[in-house]
Amino acid sequence: MVMQSFANPKKNAIYIFYVALIDTAARPAFKAAPTLATGDFKVSTDGGAFANLGTIPAVTPAGGIAVKVTLSAAEMDGDNVVVQFIDASGAQWDQVVITLVTSDNDLDDISSQVGQIGTAGGAALNFAAVDDNVDGPLNSITFVGTQASGTFVSTEAEQGTYHQIDDDTNVIDLVYQFNIGGGRTATEIIWKGYLSNSGDSMNMQMYDFVGSDWETRAAINGRNQAINETIDFPVLAKHTGTGAMLGLVFIRFITAGGSNQQLNTDELICEAVGIGESVGYANGQIWVDTVNGTAGTENFVNGTADNAVITWADALTLSASLGITDFHIINGSTIQLSADSSNYSLFGDNWTLDLNGQNINGSFFHGASVSGISTSTTGMQTFNACVIDSATIPDDTHMTECGLKGTITLGEAGNYFFHQCHMAAAGGSSPVIDYGAALNASTCHVHAFRGLIEIQNMGAGTGNYILNLDGHGRLTLNANNSATATANIAGHWDITDNANGAITLVDDARFDIDQVLATQLTESYAANGVAPTLSQAMFAMHQYLMQFGIAGTNYTVRKLDDSTTAFIVELNDAVNPTDAKRA
């Protein structure tokens, strides 16, 4: 058993202390073995009338000068407790008055709570009721009874202001609601009050969120005096709400027997501790799962890596409260931007993004399937490892390692950057970069692209339009491109020009099958004994077969002009040669 400490007076708890009484006949000596009787020792609580102590003090040890004084919890149930020592039968000792100032916690309580700080069962916090069912059903329970005085607010502290409920045809059914917040669990209920009329009884029930029913945890028995009693009882983890009812606790007072009942509640407190289980906003991000997430906007509870929110609206509420602008989107989720999304960063894989006409100035998106219209004021915004379906993008948009699938429309005149992107359309369909029919001079920088790509509406407005393209694949220039456009092409590209030469092609750095196999060779021959170039070898073989003359053992190969000697091959025999070498 743990013994109670009496280091400091605790309210509503037994308190023991020792005094020595000065002998009136032999001052300043203390009185040895004084005679103690009923009426010698009285107590007053918070200015009330003095009354005899319930336990007569005793000389301890016997025959000594020390007097042991024991005050009951009821006698200590006040902020200021005054004890007087007056010999009712004579004058054995000088009169004494001792004043005790109580506190809600003694040193043992404080030490225990401090010792638990940082643990899952850390020091408890007290919560008052935030609502009741008097003005409407709570948790499907309709109020039965009459509110005679006070409200649920009256139960915040024990101060003699009661929430008084009279019965309705001998029945009371009253529910109080607490909100202890997420990340906590209720541990104890403390009720102070009284139930009028001896013989009446009432059950105190807690709502069980696991079993979805009400569970009786304690009972109040009526009595014929208006004096508070204290009932406290432990509650379990199942009595604290989760999900949509995160942090809610319900206590119900319901008639068990009797008649003409009156429930008087002076104080009703729910104690709760932090459970300390969340992994928090991992990577400094608010986590969103629009498939299996949980609704809620409580800081440090919702939107964590192990309790992702289910709606983008909740994520934005948390962002505004916490100052976090990075988000992690769980696979399979769908996000539709709903407001200015400047300077947000959305990370994830295999999720869907609808730009929905919002400003994405300075934002970053990773791993999304993107569609919709977006705007910006100053840039730059980045899409990384995304699949771009049909989307309209603003000036200074950067796409890195993205798959282009549909039509990417330039939303305003400016510069656009595509780094190491590739074709992602199915069935050989070509993605499109559309300069827009109403824009003016704009430039697309498409670097290290792979696959099919089509360009539309270059030169549709005023000014010079430019395409800088390198990589390898097949480029189609749509017929709606016009003459104020220039395409600088580098790499391995096959070009289909449906604009019929309207676009100026600068493709000196381009190579294709027509440039490799359909380009005339320059006539040249390697010197005897020197390794030839490919072109020199091709010419030597071509002319060896096509233009030559034989005279004795000399096989003379002529150049294309059919007169100039290219080189001479010497045969080992003029009639039946079996060997030859260049002379």
Image (cartoon, rainbow, N blue to C red):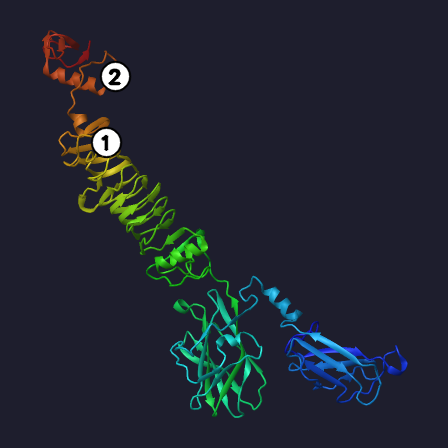
Q: Residues within 10 Å of mark 1 (few under 14, many from 20)?
A: few
Residue denoted by label 2: 531
Q: In the image, which disc is placed on residue 463?
A: 1
Q: Position of residue 398 (x, y in %)?
A: 32, 40
Residue at the far right in the pictured view: 26
Q: Position of residue 155 (x, y in %)?
A: 52, 76
Residue at the far top in the pictured view: 552
Q: Indicate which label's residue lies in the foreground, 1 or 2.
A: 1
Q: Is residue 553 left or right of residue 331?
A: left
Q: Decide which of 326, 339 is in the foreground and name it.
A: 339
Q: Is residue 177 left or right of residue 465?
A: right
Residue 477, quarter of picture: top left
Label 1 SS? loop
* Residue plotted at (48% across, 77% down): 151
Could you tell which of marks 1 and 2 lies nearer the N-terminus?
Answer: 1
Examine the rendered structure and indicate whether residue 389 appears above or below residue 259: above
* Residue plotted at (19% across, 42% down): 430
Q: Quadrant of the N terminus?
A: bottom right
Examine the rendered structure and indicate whether residue 561 appears above or below residue 300: above
Q: Is residue 363 left or right of residue 162?
A: left
Residue 31, quarter of picture: bottom right
Q: Whole-Å distance between the Cαs marked 1 and 2?
A: 52 Å
Label 2 SS? loop
Q: Quadrant of the C terminus?
A: top left
